[in-house]
Image (cartoon, rainbow, N blue to C red):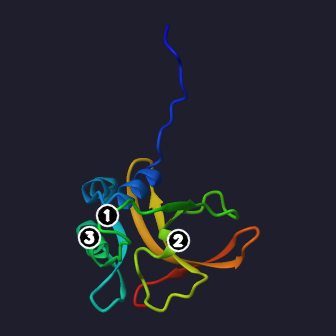
Amino acid sequence: MHSVGKTYKKTIITELAEAISSFNVGEVKSLLSDEGTFAMQNDDAVIVISGKEEFISWLTRCYRKFPFGGRFRKRLDFNIVQSLHHSTGSPIIVFEEGRFPVLSADQARNEQSGLVIKSDNNKITGIDFCYLIMKTENPFIYEKRYLTTGQ
């Protein structure tokens, strides 16, 4: 007799969040489309649009710069936020309560940086940056502000 359990298929967004949170650069790379466009920061902290390889290099540098609490690396905490206003809106992945990756040294306490994810059924086709700015705590309501290239 076989027991039948629920089958759970992870979305590509969840797979990406888990790969980034566990520092699995190879898995992140495999989830990104070769033709995709991905936001990153150049050496002058200016947001630019890049290809897959440049984004992977930038993400690797972000890992090295991020201050970890302990001697050993732990998984990054993450939340996937879906817009309440638009069911078709792009999901946003927020790592470490909006503190990873570090996009600005003067980020306000009520701001959380996030990765806005664009995807088709099986590949991540784009990543943009945004800030989620907390408007109210109960219920949690955020204003989304996109960060554009050249900032």
Q: Nearer the viewer, mark 1 or mark 2?
A: 1
- Specify which label sits upstream in the sequence, 3 or 2: 3
User: How far apart are labels 3 and 2 at the CA level?
Assistant: 20 Å
User: How far apart are labels 1 and 2 at the CA level?
Assistant: 17 Å
Mark 3 touches mark 1? (CB < 8 Å): no
User: How far apart are labels 3 and 1 at the CA level?
Assistant: 14 Å
Q: Is residue 145 left or right of residue 23?
A: right
Please identify the quarter of the rendering in which residue 100 is found: bottom left
Q: Residues within 10 Å of mark 1 (few under 14, many from 20)?
A: few
* Quadrant holding the C terminus: bottom left
- Is 26 in front, or is 120? 26
For the point 66% across and 74% down, the residue is 142
- Specify which label sits upstream in the sequence, 3 or 1: 3
- Specify which label sits upstream in the sequence, 1 or 2: 1
Q: Nearer the viewer, mark 3 or mark 2?
A: 2
**SS for dot 2:** helix
Q: Which residue is mark 1?
A: 73
**SS for dot 3:** helix
Q: Which residue is mark 3?
A: 60
Up the image or down, 57 lies above or below 5; here it is below
Q: Amino acid at mark 2?
A: Glu
Residue that lies at the very extreme toward the right in this rendered image: 138
Q: Which residue is mark 2?
A: 97
Mark 3 touches mark 2? (CB < 8 Å): no
| Percent of width and height locating residue 4 | 53, 19
